[in-house]
C-alpha cells in the first residue's frame, strides 16, 4: 500500500526552519555560557582549596608539635565549618593514635570524580631561618556539589529561555509568514486561476515593494503579455487566412508557370499560366495525376537528365528545355525546381514532392539566335577592319621610316651651309677694318645662325628619341669638370642680365663617375638656359649634393633653382610635352618647346625623372636624382 505524501505548507516549513535555527543558536550560546561558567567556578574552587591547604599547614604545625590536642580539635572544627570541605584527615606521631579526621555526616553525592582531593605534608619550623621538620600528613577533600547545583540552575534557565524564545519565534514567524508571504501568494494563486480560466489581462494590486511585490508586477506583466499574445494569435489567424487567399491568387494569376508533382513525377497541381503554356484548356482532361513527361512532351533523355540532377543536387536551376506547347508547337522554357520534404501526420517525415517554376523563353531563344547571326557578321566586320588597321599601321611605319630617313639625310644638308655661314661670319668679325655698325650686324647674323642650329639639333634629337635610336654611352667622367663646363656655358648670359649665378657642390661629391657625360651636360644646359632665360632679377643656382654613397655607386641629386617668373599648376601639367610653350614669354624669347621634353626623355633613359616645384611669380626648382657607378 503506497504511503500518502504529507503536504506541509510553506508557512509551517518556514516557521519550523526559523525555530530550528533559533533553537540551535540558543543552545549553542547556552552551552558556551554554562561551560564557561563551570570553568570559572572550578578555577575558583581550586583557588579556595589551595588557600585552605596553606592555612591548615600553617595552623596545625604548632599544635601538633606541642601536642596540643584541644587546639587541634578546634582547628579541625573550624576547617569543617567550610561547607565545601567534605573531609580532612591528619596522620602523625603527635596525634592520638597517630591519626585523626573529620568527615561530614552527609556523604557527597555523585561519583568520586566530582570531589577534589589534596594530600600534603605539615612542617614545623621553630624559627624563620631554622630548618623545618615534617610533623604530620594531611588529606583535604573538597566537594563540588555547590558548583553542580549552580550549573544546574543555569542550565534550567537556558532551557526555560529556549522554550520562551521558541514560543515567541513560532508565534512571530507564523504571523509574519502569514501576512508577508501566505496572503500575497494566495492572491497570486487566485490571479493565476483567473488567467487560467481565460481572464487574460487580469491584474493584482501591488501592496509592497519587496520580492512579493516584484513577483506581483511580473504576474501582472505576464497576464498582459498573454492578453497581447492572444490578440496577436487572433490577428495571425486572420492574417494567415488572408495571406493564404493572397498567395492562392498569386499562384493562379502568376505569369510564370508553377507546378507541384510527387516523387514519381505525377502532377499534383499547376497554375493557370502553365496550363495555358501547354494548351490544356477547360475541355481537356484534368492534369492532376498525369505524368509530367506525358503532359509536357519532354524527351526521355532530357527527363532522365533532369531527374539525375534533382536526385544528386536536390534542385535544378535555369535548365532550358523544349516542351510541347499549345497546338503542338515547340515551346522553349527555363526550369527551376527543387525537392520539398513534406511532414507526415504524426510529425515525422512524409512523402517528398517536387515544386518548380517554368518561364517561357521562346522569344529570348529567337533573340539569341538573331544575336548569334549578328555576332558572326560582326566577327567578319572585325576581321575586315583589323586587316585595314594592319595595312594603315604598315603605311604609318613606312611613313615614319621615310621621315627618319629624311631627317637623317637633311641633317647633313642643313648643317653644311649653316656651318659655312657661321664660319665666314666669325671670320668677318675678326676683321678689324669692318666698322662697328657692320660688326653688330655680323653678330646678329651669328646669333641667328646659332639659334637656327639649336633648333635643328632639337628637332633631330626629338626625331631620334621618337624612333628609339637614342642610346646612352656611359664613360668615365670628371663630374666636377662637367658641372663647371655646364655652368660656364650659361654664366656669360647670366652676367649680362646681372643675375647672381652660382654653383653649389657637396664636399663629398666623388671626383669621377661612369655616366654619358654628353647627354648629362645637354640636360643641365637645357635646364640652366631655361632658368636664365625666364629669370630677369634674382639668382640662378645649380646645386649638386650626395644623397647616399657606398663602395660601388653614388646617389646624386641635381637641382636647378631660379627666382624667375615661375609657373601655375596648369602650366606645370603641360610642361614636358613636345612643342609645348607654357609661357607667353617663351614665344617672345624664342624656342621650339622641345628642350624640356628632350631633357625629360634623356633623364628617363638614365633611370630617373625630372620633378618640378614652382610658384607663379616666385621662381622654379627642377630636380632629378641619378644612381651613378663609381670609377
Image (cartoon, rainbow, N blue to C red):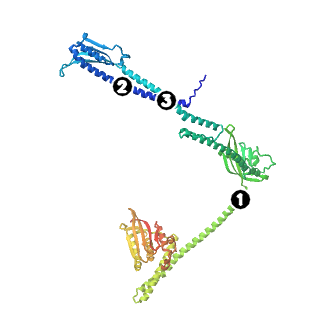
Which label lies toward us, 2 or 3? 3
Label at residue 367: 1
Residue beneath disc 2: 39
Q: Position of residue 308 (x, y in %)?
A: 68, 45
Extreme top residue here?
97
As measured in the structure, the alpha-carbon distance from the residue carrying label 1 to the one carrying label 2 is: 116 Å
Extreme right residue here?
283
Label at residue 168: 3
| Marks 1 and 3 close (CB-CB < 8 Å) | no
In-front residue for pair 54/548: 54
As measured in the structure, the alpha-carbon distance from the residue carrying label 1 to the one carrying label 3 is: 101 Å
- First in sequence, mark 1 or 3: give its number: 3
Q: Position of residue 145 (x, y in %)?
A: 37, 19
The answer to whether 237 appears left or right of 115 in the picture is right
Q: The C terminus appears in which quarter of the rendering? A: bottom left
SS for dot 2: helix
SS for dot 1: helix
Amino acid at each position: 500500500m503506497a504511503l500518502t505524501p504529507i503536504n506541509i505548507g510553506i508557512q509551517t516549513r518556514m516557521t519550523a526552519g526559523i525555530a530550528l535555527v533559533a533553537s540551535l543558536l540558543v543552545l549553542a550560546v547556552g552551552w558556551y555560557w554554562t561551560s564557561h561558567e563551570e570553568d570559572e567556578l572550578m578555577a575558583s574552587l581550586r583557588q579556595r582549596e589551595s588557600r585552605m591547604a596553606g592555612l591548615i599547614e600553617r595552623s596545625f604545625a604548632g599544635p601538633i608539635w606541642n601536642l596540643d590536642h584541644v587546639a587541634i580539635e578546634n582547628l579541625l572544627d573550624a576547617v569543617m565549618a567550610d561547607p565545601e570541605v567534605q573531609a580532612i584527615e591528619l596522620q602523625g606521631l603527635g596525634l592520638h593514635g597517630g591519626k585523626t579526621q573529620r568527615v561530614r555526616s552527609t556523604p557527597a553525592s555523585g561519583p568520586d570524580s566530582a570531589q577534589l582531593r589534596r594530600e600534603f605534608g605539615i612542617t614545623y619550623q621553630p624559627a624563620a631561618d631554622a630548618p623545618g621538620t615534617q610533623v604530620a600528613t594531611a588529606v583535604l577533600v573538597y566537594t563540588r556539589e555547590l558548583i553542580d547545583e549552580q550549573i544546574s540552575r543555569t542550565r534550567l534557565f537556558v532551557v526555560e529561555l529556549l522554550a520562551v524564545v521558541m514560543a515567541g519565534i513560532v508565534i512571530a514567524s507564523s504571523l509574519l509568514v502569514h501576512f508577508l508571504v501566505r496572503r500575497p501568494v494566495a492572491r497570486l494563486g487566485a490571479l493565476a486561476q483567473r488567467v487560467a480560466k481565460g481572464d487574460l489581462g487580469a491584474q493584482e494590486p501591488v501592496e509592497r515593494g519587496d520580492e512579493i511585490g516584484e513577483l506581483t508586477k511580473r504576474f501582472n506583466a505576464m497576464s498582459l503579455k498573454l492578453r497581447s499574445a492572444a490578440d496577436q494569435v487572433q490577428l495571425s489567424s486572420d492574417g494567415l487566412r488572408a495571406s493564404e487567399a493572397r498567395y492562392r491568387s498569386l499562384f493562379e494569376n502568376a505569369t510564370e508557370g508553377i507546378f507541384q508533382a510527387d516523387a514519381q513525377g505525377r502532377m499534383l497541381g499547376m497554375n493557370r499560366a502553365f496550363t495555358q503554356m501547354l494548351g490544356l484548356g477547360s475541355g481537356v482532361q484534368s492534369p492532376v495525376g498525369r505524368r509530367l513527361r506525358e503532359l509536357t512532351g519532354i524527351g526521355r533523355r532530357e527527363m532522365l537528365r533532369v531527374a539525375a540532377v534533382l536526385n544528386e543536387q536536390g534542385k535544378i536551376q535555369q535548365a532550358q528545355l523544349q516542351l510541347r506547347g499549345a497546338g503542338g508547337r515547340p515551346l522553349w522554357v527555363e526550369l527551376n525546381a527543387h525537392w520539398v520534404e513534406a511532414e507526415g501526420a504524426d510529425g515525422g517525415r512524409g512523402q517528398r514532392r517536387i515544386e518548380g517554376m517554368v518561364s517561357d523563353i521562346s522569344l529570348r531563344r529567337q533573340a539569341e539566335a538573331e544575336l548569334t547571326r549578328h555576332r558572326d557578321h560582326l566577327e567578319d566586320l572585325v576581321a575586315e577592319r583589323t586587316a585595314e588597321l594592319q595595312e594603315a599601321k604598315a603605311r604609318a611605319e613606312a611613313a615614319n621610316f621615310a621621315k627618319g630617313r629624311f631627317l637623317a639625310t637633311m641633317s647633313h644638308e642643313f648643317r653644311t651651309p649653316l656651318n659655312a655661314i657661321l664660319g665666314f661670319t666669325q671670320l668677318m668679325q675678326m676683321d678689324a677694318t669692318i666698322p662697328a655698325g657692320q660688326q653688330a650686324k655680323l653678330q646678329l647674323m651669328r646669333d641667328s645662325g646659332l639659334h637656327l642650329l639649336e633648333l635643328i639639333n632639337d628637332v633631330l634629337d626629338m626625331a631620334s628619341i621618337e624612333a628609339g635610336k637614342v642610346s646612352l654611352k656611359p664613360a668615365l667622367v670628371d663630374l666636377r669638370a662637367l658641372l663647371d663646363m655646364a655652368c660656364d656655358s650659361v654664366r656669360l648670359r647670366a652676367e649680362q642680365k646681372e643675375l647672381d649665378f652660382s654653383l653649389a657642390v657637396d664636399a663629398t661629391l666623388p671626383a669621377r663617375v661612369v655616366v654619358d657625360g654628353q647627354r648629362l651636360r645637354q640636360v643641365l644646359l637645357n635646364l640652366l638656359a631655361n632658368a636664365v632665360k625666364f629669370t630677369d632679377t634674382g639668382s640662378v643656382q645649380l646645386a649638386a649634393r650626395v644623397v647616399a654613397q657606398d663602395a660601388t655607386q653614388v646617389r646624386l641629386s641635381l637641382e636647378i633653382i631660379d627666382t624667375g617668373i615661375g609657373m601655375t599648376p596648369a602650366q606645370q601639367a603641360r610642361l614636358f610635352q613636345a612643342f609645348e610653350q607654357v609661357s607667353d614669354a617663351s614665344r617672345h624669347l624664342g624656342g621650339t618647346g622641345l628642350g624640356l621634353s628632350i631633357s625629360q626623355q634623356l633623364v628617363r633613359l638614365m633611370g630617373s625623372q625630372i620633378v618640378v616645384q614652382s610658384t607663379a611669380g616666385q621662381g622654379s626648382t627642377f630636380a632629378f636624382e641619378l644612381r651613378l657607378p663609381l670609377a
